[in-house]
Image (spheres, grey):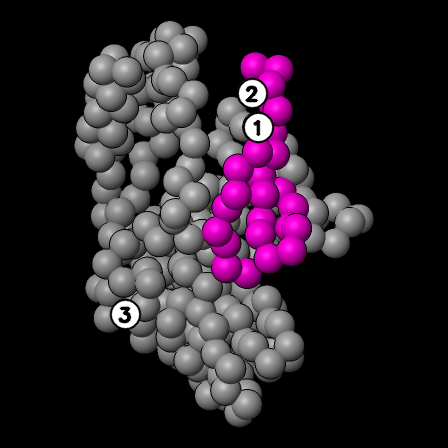
Amino acid sequence: MKKTVLTIIVLFSIFIQAQENYKYVIIPSQFSFFKEADKYGLNSLTKSFFETEGFTVYYDTDKLPNEILNARCNALHVEVTENNKMFTTNLSVQVKDCTNKTVALSLLGSSRDKDFQLANTNALRDALTSLKGKLKFKINENSVKQAVVMEDKESFVGEIDEKDMVVSNKSLLYALPTPTGFKLVDNTPNIIFELKKTSVENMFLAERGIIDNGIFYKTGDVWYFEFYKRGKLSSETVEVKF
């Protein structure tokens, strides 16, 4: 276990050294779930938030400076996703790099206001607020990949005790919608599970990291994650807010 901790510390240190500051953010002038630009002023709200975070912000319909046109990876791209339920407006924010990889996920912003403008504004404001102070970095992936290659992957996995891989059931996870299902994130937010829809209601194919694969389903009011570990069936309860 000591070896595992030391390995993680080394990788984390190299990862931190590989970070650089982003300067630009590009946001949609019209979100995909609306039929008009800047509906309810949500796009303006998003632009204002990132500007207060210290970024130079452009709409995707703006004329972009050469610094972005000549190097698209100098900018982050923002997507807002809607996952409304009956009587509840739910919005989440994803921040992606130039390779379409998610570098930050907001918590799910929710509102039960009956007024559509108020509901959407409050939900988006909550989601954006959860990202405050978490976006001033750029990942140099080549440095990270080089650091991982330098490690002995088999010995690294072998040193981790099974009980250390279990996600704490006491930690509430938040569901962020994706085209194929959901990503479950903690309040950091880190991605803990990736869920893919099935033909059965409240049952998903689930992945936790690169090690655990199984099913994620609901019985009564409780969500369960079932998976095989070294030939043995394991079951865990998971607290999650959809």
> Counting other residues with Cα less than 10 Å from the Cα at mark 3, is it few (<14), some (14-19), or many (20 or more)?
some
Query: Given the current orientation, which residue lies at the most extreme right position?
Result: 199
135 or 4: which is nearer to us? 4
Gap between marks 1 and 3, in whole Å?
A: 46 Å
> Residue 203, how many percent across, how many down?
69, 47
Rendered residue at 48%/32% (across/down): 209
Looking at the rendered structure, the kind of residue marked 1 is Ser
Q: Which residues are magenta?
A: 216-242
Looking at the rendered image, the disc whose residue lies closer to the viewer, 1 or 3, is: 1
Are the residues tagged 1 and 2 within 8 Å (C-beta)?
Answer: yes
Q: Earlier in the sequence, mark 1 or mark 3?
A: 3
The residue identified by callout 2 is: 229
Rendered residue at 23%/58% (across/down): 133
Q: Is residue 184 above or below residue 115?
A: above
Gap between marks 2 and 3, in whole Å?
A: 46 Å
Asked whether residue 207 is in view, the answer is: no
> Counting other residues with Cα less than 10 Å from the Cα at mark 2, is it few (<14), some (14-19), or many (20 or more)?
few
Looking at the rendered structure, the kind of residue marked 3 is Glu
Are the residues tagged 1 and 3 within 8 Å (C-beta)?
Answer: no
144 or 69: which is nearer to us? 144
Looking at the rendered structure, the kind of residue marked 2 is Lys
Is residue 97 in the magenta section?
Answer: no
